[in-house]
Amino acid sequence: MATKAEMRDRIEARINEGLRDKWYPVAKSVEIRSDRPYGTEAQGEKLVLWRTADGSIRCIEDFCPHRGAPLSFGEVHEGHIGCRYHGIIVDGTGTVQRVPAMPDCPMEGSKVLRAYQVQEVADAVFVFLSQKETDTAPDLPLPQELSNPNWTGFLCSAVWDVNYRYALDNLADPMHGCFLHAESFTLAFGSKQDILDLDRKEAGFKVSRVGQVGENFDWVQFHIEEGGMFCFLDIPYPPAAGPGGHMRILGYVTPMGPRRCKVFFWRMREVSGTARESWRFLYRARLEERHWNVLEQDRVMLEGMPDDARTRERLYQHDIGVAHLRRMLTRAARSQLEAEDGQKPNAAE
Ligand code: FES
Ligand SMILES: [Fe+2]
C-alpha cells in the first residue's frame, strides 16, 4: 500500500510528465511530409511521423528495431519508413516489412514498435498519447471556431525550453498581460490593478478580471475533457488591426520532456467575404510579427524561471486560475494513477 507521501510524489511526477491517455498536438500539418520523416518528442517519448501517398499520417516510435537508430533520420519509402543505418523498412503499424541486408531475416513480419493514433485537424497533427497502444480513444476536444466557417485564422507553434506546466500557468494568469506585454500593440491598454473571479464551468473553468472587461487579456477559459484540454481567450483589437471582431486565441500545450514543451496557438477572427481576405493579408504582412514578439516575451520569462519555482512561490489572489488549474491536474493525475494501480494483476491481493 502506497503511503500518502509516495502517492504525492507519483502525482507530482505524473503531472510533470503530462497526463496520459490524452490527445496532444505534436506538429503543424505542413511539417509532416511524404518525402521525409519528422521526428519529435512528446511526454518523453520519441516519435516519428510521415505521410503516405494518400496523404494520411503515420506515427510510430522513433527507434529502429535493429540497433536503435532514430528512424526520423531515415527516409520515407513507398509509404513506410526506412532506417538510414542499415536499411530496415518499418510500416506505420510498427511492423518490420523488410530487412534488405539479410535474406529471410526472422524480424520480417513482426510488429516490434508501438504505433500511435493520429488526427489531422485545422492545420495541426494530434497524437493520442496513451499509456499503452490502443485502438480506442476518447474524443479529441476541439474548439468550435476550428470547424466553424465563419471563423478564420492562423496556427503558430513554438518549442519552449520549459516544463509545459509553466506554459499552462501562464495562460491561466490574465494579469501578466498588462505587465509583461505592456509595450505591445494590443495589450498595452487597461489598468494594472484588479481582482479576479473564478467561474467553474461544466467542462473546465473561466478566470476573469472583475474591474476590466473588453480592454486587454481580461479573461481566459480552460476547456477540459477526458480526451485532453485547450484554452481560449479574446484580445480586443484596435481599428488599425483590420476587419473582424476581437481576436480569439485558442491554445494547446504539449509536454515534450521534463524541460521542454510545444505551444500551439490559433489566432482567429470571425470575419467573412472580402474583409476576410484583407484581414488575412494584414495578418501576414504586419500582425504576425507583432504576435511573435508577444509570444517571445512569454517564452523568455518562463524559460528564465527555475524548475522548482513552485516550491518557493507565494501565490496571491490573482493566481486563482493557476491554483484551480493545478487542483484539476492533481485530481486527474490521482485518478489516473489509481485506475492504473487497480489494473495491476495483484491489485486485489
Ligand atoms: S539501426 Fe536501423 S537498420 Fe540498423
Ligand atoms: Fe503572455
Image (spheres, grey):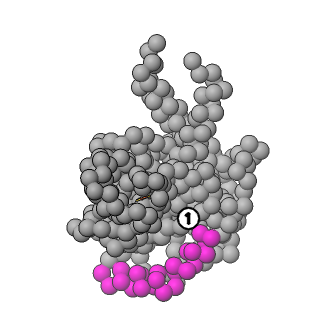
**Residue toward you, 1 or 305:** 1
Q: Quadrant of residue 291?
A: bottom right
**Ligand 1 shows up in which quadrant of the image?**
bottom left
Q: Position of residue 15 (x, y in %)?
A: 57, 42
What secondary structure predominates along the stretch shown in magenta? helix
Q: How many marks?
A: 1
Q: Residue at x 63, y 21 (%)?
A: 3
Q: Which residue sits at x=68%, y=71%?
A: 182
Residue type beneath disc 1: Val
Q: Which segment is the magenta one?
A: 273-296
Residue at the spot 46% in from the left edge and 42% down from the top edge: 20
Residue 279: image quadrant is bottom left
Give the farthest residue toward the top: 349
For residue 148, side relative to residue 153 (left or right): left
Q: Label 1 belongs to which residue?
A: 159
Q: Quadrant of residue 80?
A: bottom left
Q: Position of residue 219 (x, y in %)?
A: 55, 57
Q: Quadrant of the N terminus?
A: top right
Is 284 colored magenta in this rendering?
Answer: yes
- Residue 348 place in picture, x, y as percent: 44, 15
Residue 38 showing in the rendered view: no
Above or below, 44 relative to 121:
above
Q: Secondary structure at mark 1?
A: strand
Give left or right: position of 143 versus 293: left
> Neighbour class for label 1 at 10 Å: few (<14), some, many (≥20)?
some
Viewer-nearest residue: 271 or 172: 172
Q: Nearer the viewer, residue 276 or 250?
A: 250
